[in-house]
Image (cartoon, coloured by chain):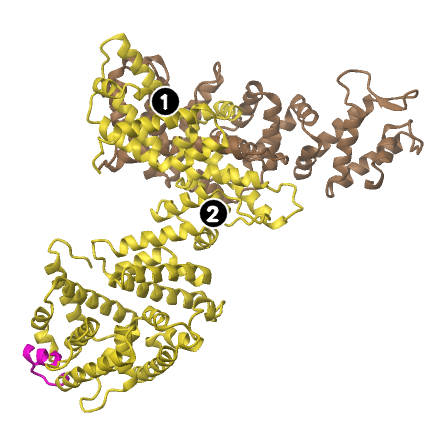
Amino acid sequence: MDSLLEHLDRFSEVLAVSRTTHVSTWDPATVRRALQWAGYLRHIHRRFGRHARIRKALEQRLQNQWKQEGDSGPTPAPGLANFQALGHCDQLLSLRLLANPALGDASFHFLLQQLFPGPGVPDAEEEALQGSLARFARCRAAAHMLRFHAYRENPVLQKDSVMKTQAELLLRRLQEVGEAEAEGPGRLLSRLWERLPQSNFLKVVAAALLLPAASPRLQEEELGVGSPRTPGDGRQELLRWLLGKSDIAVAFCRNLPAELLTSVAGRHPELSPVYLGLLTNWGRQLHYDLPKGLWIGTEPQDVPWEELFSRFQSLCQAPPPLKDEVLTALKSYKAQDGDFEVPGLSIWTDLLLALGSLV
Amino acid sequence: MAADSAGLPSNYEFWMQKLSVWTQASTLETQRDICLHLPQFQEFLRQMHETLKEMDSNTIIERFPTIYQLLAKSCWSPFILAYDESLKILIWCLCCLIKKDPQNSRESKLNSWTRRLLSHIVSTSRFDIKEVGLFNQVLGYAPTDYYPGLLKNMVLSLVSELRENHLNGFNSQRRMSPERVRSLSRICVPLVTLPDFEPLVEALLTYHGHEPQEVLWPEFFDAVNEAFLLKKISLPTSAILCLWLRHLPSLENTMLHLFEKLISSERNSLRRIGCFMKESLLPEAAACHPAIFRVVDEIFRSALLETDGAPEVLAGIQVFTQCFVEALEKENKQLKFALKTYFPYASPSLVMVLLQHPKDIPRGLWHQSLKCISEMLKEVVEDYGSYGGPFESWFLFVHFGGWADITAEQLLMSEAEAEPPEALLWLLAFSCSPGAGHQQRAQIMVEVKTVLGHLTKLFRSPALSARDLQAAAEENQGGDPRPPACQQLVRRLLLYFLLWAPGGHAIAREVITLMAQTDAIMNEIIGLLDYTLYRWDHLCMEARRSRKLARELLTELREQASPRQVNQ
């Protein structure tokens, strides 16, 4: 077991080096060794895929490695992400070496001979790598062609295939990291928040919260067998983090479209009080301008009436209990303000009036 | 297999020109042109590789000075890179150009340029979606981790859009415009052999829009059919059915492919041909939809006429019909379409009788069915009624070839002193010589009757000699020479005699040697043995001794005919 873990560490180092200029010192023998190690790990993946204890140990080791890398400095190139990645670690190594201009010509030549032996190769192992590299490249070209020629962004965000993929990957990663360490998911999410364009990240979070609950069997297939994870773990982590960081929650509720937020709040009742609370605060910031006959804010960052209204409108079109919750709140605020029917005195009255038939 | 190096230079120029046009602009026209040429271009690349791998890189540059441009331009189009094995072959070609140790700065430069191009096409990173790339980098996933999932989601989303289109009709907001569907079919052309695309291919094939004309690219259908024939894609029968119904040339190509197998020099056994037939899905599709059956039948009919009744084509028809009937039975207990839609030129009652499987009828009643068939055919043939001439009737009859052979066997095994029934004799005569006039047919019947008379007498005798059989089969000395069709019939009777008569086994080899005077006759006998075994398999006939003999004879004769090939 120990030797296995050590082997894993060594290979991860090799993988990290394969991107750097250090490969200029690699001679063909080194390249061969690296490829052999990759082959050995692939064999491990095949052999111990169903062996929960070994699988878990290897997975843990990889998550620890990644945690150490991730905390320090700028984003490094990904190494082996999880146990499943062992299944194509030879592909990963090969692609890195092929793209590295620092690799000497003789070593590069040797690498090519190993990777692309040509037609009619009797060795099944070699043929497999050649075939899988070609297939991977085709896969990428195919995705590009679909994106470029046939793709239309789905207006329903959570159904958009690119968004959906990112959401699935996020959840999967949260689960993997969470298995290794309890604070893992929170840290990862904070890191993502810092390093990615915020509006895109928030959309991915929303999409992830809206993914259909995966069936356990599907999860198993995805993760390649017998995983003790329960579906929904990643989602819980995500929600917890979101609700725990007030500034992020505010950005979430402020920047995402009304329809999307309604769906998320409907699906995750824990969010609705937070959302409602924010809407209430925003509403309270506005005052009635008598000459213009409008509700307006004083600060530039105040949420305008139109937006407030559209959000409430969307919420009131949601199925119960969300709809009822919102209406109850609105009516109680109206009552607190004096229960006026005349417009211009309480924003809550005016909102209810504007919502009209939905109420 | 060997590269046509004489043709290579001119091909090279042709493809250089083509590539220059293709890289100028990416319009619909160029895309269409690329798709049309993908298979030939791949073949050219293969030939290039064969040539290049024999040379060292300096020689290559001398011989093909513009090779770098050619390869670079090829790598430009995602259609080319996505197609089948083109990417692999391009990589191989580039590998031939990489030097192990460059001698001077020029070689170094070329080397690093080639290396960059190589890594470029293997990792195709310029095709990446930026926000996805960054996202995954921070998550800690490499492209090898997430690309398959991304592609799968994109494919599934497109599939559900196509299906939604189908269900919601005009009201759906997400309805795919015909241009988009066409565009999708165009993209699929190079990618039909990528397993991840199978759901999309299937969804396109079964897609029914609301436009009166075909929305999908014809090149798409061609590509799918080619891939299916070469077993590079697996699709359900319903999808293939759609393919053939929407695009007739695909069906025709499949038939051509089948004929190539039938008439190949390998002399496949009928059992093997039966397997090909079933794999091709032709019988199943024909059973599901009469239009397909009619087209296939028409092609068989033309082939039969053009080859003057070649036995291979005949065998193909019989095997096809056998598989077709099986598929029909499996498909539905009662026929979804009336028999008339499959056989419009035949009387329905005749078709019903012919379709009956002999194994479903008790053996003692076989001669009843035969009489029935004979009478119905006779009526049509001699009456020139509304059901087409003698050829049509004969063509129908040979579909179900087993009946003619059963007639022969029945006649052989009847009582020695009894008169063979006229109806059965007529049937035999008709099957071997449909175009014969009334007089001729009568003459054939007389000949056969005489031979049968001899044979039935010899049937039960325990000890026979080859001479006895030869005498039985001899022509009448005084009369006209036997027509060749009749000779064939007599040989068939002799062969069945050898297989069935208790005394026949001992003299079988001797008699066959005497019969097989020419190669053609030898092939005929081999074909007959093969067909008999095939037929007995489907009849679930016991007959252990006869079967054993037939099998042994078949193996021996095949060995003799072509010593290196023994096809079972």
Q: Secondary structure at mark 1?
A: helix
* Residue placed under numbered mark 2 in the picture: B202
Q: Position of residue B69 (x, y in %)?
A: 34, 20
Return the residue found at the far bottom.
B417
Q: Is residue A284 above or below residue B461?
A: above
* Numbered-mark total: 2
Which residue occupies 37% across, 50% down? B253
Specify whether residue A57 is in view: no
* Residue placed under numbered mark 1 in the picture: B72
Specify whether residue B431 is in view: yes
Which residue occupies 7% across, 72% down? B510
Q: Nearer the viewer, mark 1 or mark 2?
A: 1
Q: Is residue B488 above or below residue A107?
A: below
Question: Splitting the image into 4 quarters, where does residue B282 fall?
Answer: bottom left
Q: Amino acid at mark 1?
A: Ala
What is the drawing colour of chain B?
yellow
Closer to the chain start, of discs 1 and 2, is 1
Rate crowding at label 2 as few (under 14), some (14 to 19) or many (20 or more) other CA atoms within 10 Å: many
Q: Is residue B63 magenta?
A: no
Subunit under mark 1: B
Instruction: Indicate left or right for B156 with B464 as reference.
Output: right
Which chain shows up in brown?
A: A
Q: Which residues make up the magenta segment?
A: B459-475
Instruction: Indicate left or right for A274 with B250 as reference.
Output: right
Q: Is residue B300 above or below residue A195?
A: below
Q: Position of residue A182 (x, y in %)?
A: 52, 28
Return the residue found at the far top.
B105
